[in-house]
Image (tube, helix red, strand yellow):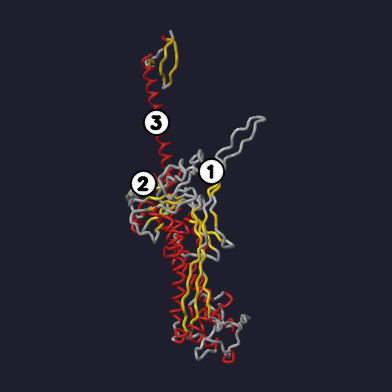
Amino acid sequence: MKVKVKRNGVVIEIDEAEVLPTDELITEAHLSEQIDEDTQAVRRLLAENERQKQEAEDAKKVRASRVKMCEYLLDTALGASKLPNAAQSVVRKMFTGKVFEPTELEDAIEEQRKVLTEVLASQRISGPGRSTGAMFNSDDQLEAAVADLFGVERRAELAAVKPARLSGIRELYLMLTGDFELHGGYYGERISLATTADFAGLVKNALNKIVVNSFERMGTAGYDWWKKITLQEHFTNLNDITGTLVGTIGSLPLVAEQGEYTELAVGDSPETASFLKYGGYLPLTLEAIDRDETRKLRQYAVELGNAAMRNISEKVANIFTTNSAAGPVMADTGALFNSTAVTTAGGHANLLTTAIGTDYTAWNAIALAMYNQPMLVKNATGYYGTGKKLAVEPRYCLVPRALRAAAEALFIPRWSSAQQNVANVSATWGGLVDPVVVPEWTDATDYAAVCDPAIAPSIIVGERFGLVPEIYIAGRETDPAVFMNDEHRLKVRQFIALVVGDFRPLHKENVGG
């Protein structure tokens, strides 16, 4: 009879007569117990393997979230660093796609600043003077002197010019007009300076530079928020602009063999806007010239630049607050923001009344509504709301100043907080939405969401002669204002058109009712 024994740790089958005293007899019960033990061991191994896989997957998600947050920090830090593009590229290459500590990034930026400082310092060191061969005429000297008088940057070609410094606007006026009695005329026989430049032209050019500088500074202060959420386009005439939204073809219908092709249902939704002219003038009187009020003239130009930037900011902000905060009425007969179903003519389903809150409940509802917005097929019965999903998430959260802290708490990662659950925050909206303060909004509770205009454009800012207005000066001796009013007039003009081409990338929360 054959039996199974374990000999020297190995299970073998032998005749019963060959069993040794040291052999361990293997019975059926013994085998069953061994099988159960092995089965349990296998299950434990499988469970451990699954746990390790899950941990690896969780770790991968957390790392991806940290990389996203690091990318946001990198963009923010470089934008605020004021480093030139070349230096920013060096830092970006060091940290893109990596997980890093904020201090590492700060050290790298500071290192680039030191390098630039050393380079600029070495360029300021000069040896014995030598001729550069540059030749400048009286017009160049005068242009450089006027730029210095108004504190604006010279043209690059005039960087090496060393003109005599002007004492003020009075000296410049008398030098170029010979009008010592302040009659408002031009007296060429009294002018000793050989130049083709004229007073009005030189002052206009300098003041235009001040306007540009103040326009940009006002934007840096927060008034250029609208650039993030709009498309800015240049137009070559003052015809009405059209923000036509063409319908999408969701899918192509099946055509049977020798079957007839059917017409595809595609329409459009044209939104139009007219160019509006904004401007005015400021007087530069002969009395102000005689009092040498150069500083006041410079401040005039600053105010014109500031006003131009605030003007665009106000017009874009009003899109969200006009018509009792429902926005302008669109071509489909519906207000820009309404809660009517999109399957109804004029229904936009982009208006709610939920406060921003301290978690993502309200924002998730906004994002879901925006994501599910159906693309346009055509504005006709049977087609309203039948397009495929827009499938785009909101990129910007527009808030009044009163809600800035609440928005930043939701969307800007806080590196200094040791208690922050990085995975939970970044996996939802932290670092993925840009809070934007709208200076003109006064309601302390209402806010809005906007998609990235590069992906889903909505608001178009059209300009005819540039976003920055240009100054014109009426100041020749033949100008009526010079004779009648003893003043040179500084006129500023700006042509702007605003059109909302599509409601789908916009969402409003009118919390106050």
The amino acid on which the numbered mark 3 sits, given as a three-letter code, is Ala
Closer to the observer: label 3 or label 2? 2
Question: Does any portion of residue 316 appear in the rendered image?
Answer: yes
Q: CA distance from mark 3 to mark 2?
A: 39 Å
**In the rendered image, which residue does mark 3 sit on?**
47
Q: Which residue is mark 1?
A: 378
Q: In the depicted view, which residue is nearer to us: 24 or 56?
A: 56
The tag on residue 362 is: 2
Mark whose residue sits in front, 1 or 2:
1
Q: Residue 491, how many percent across, how many down?
A: 50, 74
Disc 1 and disc 2 in contact, CB within 8 angstroms:
no
Pair 3/1: label in front: 1
Q: Is residue 29 left or right of residue 119?
A: left
- Give percent across and percent down for residue 215: 47, 68
Say if residue 22 shows up in the picture. no
Classify 208 as above or below 6: below
Q: Is residue 512 left or right of residue 146?
A: left
Eyeballing the image, is 297 above or below 97? below
Q: Quadrant of residue 192?
A: bottom right
First of labels 3, 1 by sequence position: 3
Q: Is residue 128 above or below residue 89?
A: below
Q: Position of residue 17 (x, y in %)?
A: 41, 9
* Residue at figure coordinates x 48%, y 69% from the top left: 279
Q: Residues within 10 Å of mark 3 (few under 14, many from 20)?
A: few
Quick one: which residue is furthest to the right in this view? Answer: 258
